[in-house]
Amino acid sequence: MTEQKSPNEAPHLIRHFSTLQATALNMSNMIGIGPFITIPLLMSALGGPQSMLGWLVAVLIVIPDGMVWSELGAALPGSGGSYVYLREGFGSKTFGRLLAFLFIWQFILSGPLEIASGYIGFASYMGYLWKDMPSYGPKLVVVVVGILNILLLYRQIKHVGRITVSLWIGTLLTTGAVIMTGFMHFNPDIAFDFPPDAFKFSTGFLLGLGAASRVGVYDYLGYYDICYIGDEVKNPGRTIPRSIIISVIAVALIYISINLSIIGVISWREFVPYDPAKPASNFIVSLMMEKVYGKPIAIIVTVMILWTAFGSVFALLLGYSRIPYAAARDGYFFKIFGRLHPKHNFPNVSLLVIGLISILCSFLSLGMVIDVLIATRIIVQFIGQIFAVSLLRKNRPDLERPYRMWLYPIPSLIALVGWVFIFLTSGNMTILFSLGALLLGIVCFLLWSRQTSKWPFEEPT
């Protein structure tokens, strides 16, 4: 039964998302446009099918990291996800304040960048349908889709849940069509056409593997999206871990199938090296379907891919709009972001701001968007949460844990090594940018804390 609000009751979030809806949210976020636009980037990382090793590295990171999210999400099911986990794990009155602030600080950039990548992919595949698209066409598509996304989410959560499942069904149909086509027309000579010295180990190979893994991790992002709306999940202690684990395993199998399907029909040599000016780099799946079935079927599948892409950005904006709201509600961000819609009980100000910033970020290149958003998240969010799990087990043994990480602490250590590898192979400029942004965030935190007389500048009582 849906929770009803009495006439005199203050606006509040409603627990409505079930395991099905939570899994749909995660999978819609994870699949989205990623595998349809990143194959050229992935294959270019190592110059051939050996780049698929990046998928293996990525899945070996996200599965144990999913266990980290599951334990934290089940024990601390509040809106904001990482913001809550870092704050409570490192101490809400001391270093937890710093880590929570830094997470919001980096999120203001990385969150909209991730949503923007979906808008960029949507615009790329529109290029297959809109053959004579003018130079301003992609920007126009991004703006229209971005505004439509905001309008659909500007409503009560129970209606959003139904929309989420509908978009998820479209995502499964799209991926199923691509996988079946690939398996029916799979050519191993095309798929495993390795270049000379494909697996020769060197520094260049290691850096290329890091780049391929970074693209793979990007495509898996979203397995934790339900954690951001923890206050709107029914029975979160069971729903959150189940939805994360089901999503990671299901999408891992789907991704492997999709990628083998594509490179088994279209030679990787047609889109390597990656070049946005090449049609194969922009809408490779549409070209695959055209090659097998002809133009009419390719158009239908392209429309399905656009549906899938929209499902992804819909899920992302839904979850990410709750993060500034949670921070503002607890006094860690501008107060205006803590407002809820007086009638429909959703964070309307946060939704509008994150949605508009995402549209602006869509004017950047896809490669730049992926590199920056991954690197800026690793230190504070992903690595920070790994330590938060251990600190909570040590300092909060009384905390109720409906789900406990299997084989602890082995999954945490595997995830930690994986994230360090991804970060160190991100390229000097990306590393320097992310570290510089982190340092600037620390300075702003200290200035803000000094002005408000809070830790570490609070006066003794």
Image (spheres, rainbow, N blue to C red):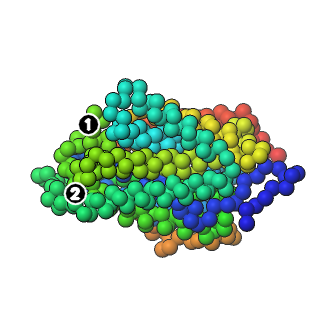
Q: Residue 430 placed where, x, y %?
A: 39, 38
Residue 408 vs 263, above or below: the answer is below
Q: Residue 212 placed where, x, y %?
A: 31, 50
- At a point 51% along the width and 34% down the height, the residue shown is 144
Q: Nearer the viewer, residue 290 or 346?
A: 290
Q: Residue furthest bottom?
A: 407
Residue 331 vs 173, above or below: the answer is above
- At a point 88% along the width and 51% down the height, the residue shown is 8
Residue 328 vs 451, above or below: the answer is below
Left or right for 424, reference 28: left
Q: Splitting the image into 4 quarters, where does residue 181 fall? A: bottom left
Residue behind mark 1: 278
- At a point 58% along the width and 50% down the height, the residue shown is 319
Which residue type does callout 1 highlight? Lys
Residue behind mark 2: 264
Res. 101 in view: no
Residue 36 vs 251, above or below: the answer is above
| Element class at badge 1 | loop
- Tell me the crowding category of disc 1: few under 14, some 14 to 19, or many 20 or more residues within 10 angstroms, Cα based: some
Specify which label sits upstream in the sequence, 1 or 2. 2
- At a point 50% along the width and 73% down the height, the residue shown is 406
The alpha-carbon separation of the residues under discs 1 and 2 comes to: 19 Å
| Element class at badge 2 | loop
Q: Residue 151 placed where, x, y %?
A: 61, 40
Left or right for 261, reference 349: left
Which residue type does callout 2 highlight? Gly
